[in-house]
Amino acid sequence: MTESPAPPEDRARWRNWAGNQRAVADVVRPGSADEVAAVLTAATAAGRRVRPIGSGHSFTGIGSPEDVQLVCDGMVGVRSVTDDGLVTVGSGTTLHRLNAELLRRGWSMTNLGDIDRQTIAGALATGTHGTGARFGGLATQVRGLELVTPDGEVLACSADRSPDVFRAARVGLGALGVVTEVTLQAEPAFALRAVEGPGTLTAALGDFTDLMTSTDHVEFYWFPHTDATLLKCNTRVPLEEGLHPLPRWRAVWDDEILANAAFAGVVAAGRRVPALVPPLARMSAKALGARTWTDHSHRVFVSRRRVRFLEMEYAVPCADAAAVLAELRRVHEASDWRSAFPVEVRVAAADDIPLSTASGRATAYIAAHVPAGNEPGPWFDALEQIAGEVGGRPHWGKLHGLDAGQLRDRYPRYDEFVAVRDRLDPGGVLSNAYLDRVLGPVGAHRPR
Ligand SMILES: Cc1cc2nc3c(=O)[nH]c(=O)nc-3n(C[C@H](O)[C@H](O)[C@H](O)COP(=O)(O)OP(=O)(O)OC[C@H]3O[C@@H](n4cnc5c(N)ncnc54)[C@H](O)[C@@H]3O)c2cc1C
């Protein structure tokens, strides 16, 4: 669809964090909603496709530009905070900057995923979530959005203004408009007491619901080739109770040396000699010992991820999670696959967002990983097939093989989203190959 190639100096390479998605496209860096509108109207007139660019932390091609990459780093920072914690922030703000700026003002995000490198708009667009049976993904904190539609309209939406756009755009896949500003409900800054230690998959499957609701934010990592898990239970505590962060040496030892440097060695050794993976997995499972600490919430929620990997994550009904995990273990044990990376298991409350992976149902998330540069192969196929049997929904930013027809069956409100997309972007200016696959071309779906 590119018509007039831009001069070479305007073009730049783009690649995602994992290195499995690459592109070359023109670059624009608007600093305001009006400048975004000018980019979009020019692209619409020229029949070019525009992709808003976040931090490139999606594994799928959702963020891959075709003609124009619209970089959002000119729209950053907290713009206002009301007395009741409504925070308005530029869409290109990274989560680590947002967390720091919120804490300085006495506020926190309610829940976070396990890293903070993403932009707020990028994280929202794919339905980024953390863990906690009573808590939704990041998009459930959104109270207002300013987005620029392909015809150049700057649209402020909320539950009261353009509510149909607002409902859909909280998890908008970057398909409804370029978000320029986000208003979030923050909450008074709080701390998390983290209790981490070894467990077993057998125990986790024995009473999955009890375990995952045993405190506010529970997750575990299961190490294939073993029955071992690493269990993380985070409890919300008032800041007044005081912080007991990890001593610096322990944080460096656990989070940098064991979780990153040593693990990188394990992954590299496993790639060279696959037969070493099972014993190395058993060693990895034992290496991370028990620890208890209390720190500002965002410091407990997030970690550093220096070892590059590819990921698939499926959202399944919470009630089916134990059966899905048991079947995944059975299939893995019956195979000769080598899996150095643990399987991550988290939960979230049901929400009311059409394309949220937790839309309308209490959800458990099951994520598999392989080293970046490896073919995911049958391990990801197995997760996709087993999760599919219970209506599993793939994370929009993590690898999967589903198309529009299959996804439509998994989301009761899929047509509601697509109708808003077809209205706001009739020319498909904000589409790309991935969005064509998962949403279908504009106008492709008839109401059920
Ligand atoms: C190491 C690692 C850890 C992760 N941990 C988690 C986790 O704990 N939980 C979880 O759910 N996910 C997790 N993810 C996935 C990640 O949160 C999502 O893929 C997220 O979308 C990445 O944000 P980003 O800023 O990099 O956006 P990108 O990947 O760059 O873009 C994602 C989408 O957002 C769109 N977009 C960006 N800016 C705008 C804008 N201004 N307006 C409209 N659309 C926009 C893009 O066009 C694209 O469609 C992880 C990924 C990695 C690599």
Image (cartoon, rainbow, N blue to C red):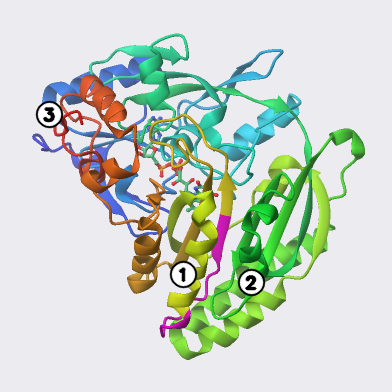
The residue type indicated by label 2 comes to Thr
The spot of residue 126 in percent (x, y) is 42, 40
Helix, strand or loop at label 1? It is: helix
In front: mark 3 or mark 1? 1
Task: Say the numbered circle drawn on residue 47.
Answer: 3
Does the magenta-highlighted stretch encompass residue 383? no
Is residue 372 positioned above or below 350 on the image? below
**N-terminal-most mark, 3 or 2:** 3
Identity of the residue furthest to the right in this view? 241
User: Where is residue 94 drawn, in percent x and y?
Assistant: 54, 37
What amino acid is found at the position of numbered circle 1 in the picture? Leu
- Report which quarter residue 33 is drawn in: top left
Residue 328 numbered tag: 1
Callout 1–callout 2 Cβ contact below 8 Å:
no
What amino acid is at disc 3?
Gly
Question: Is 406 situated left or right of 85 in this image?
Answer: left
- Classify residue 53 as left or right of residue 149: right
Tell me what residue is drawn at x 25 percent, y 46 percent: 434
Is residue 115 in sight in this rendering? no
Answer with mark 1 or mark 2, whichever residue precedes in sequence: 2
Is residue 339 one of those drawn in magenta?
yes
Stretch in magenta: 333-345
Indicate which disc residue 285 carries: none
- Within 10 Å of disc 2 (Cα), the crowding (few <14, some 14-19, many 20+) is some
Other residues around mark 3 within 10 Å, as few (<14) / some (14–19) / many (≥20): some
Q: CA distance from mark 3 to mark 2?
A: 55 Å
Is 370 situated left or right of 186 in this image? Answer: left
Q: Residue at x 48, y 90 (%)?
A: 275
Image-quadrant location for residue 272:
bottom left
Q: Tell me the residue that label 2 is attached to.
A: 202
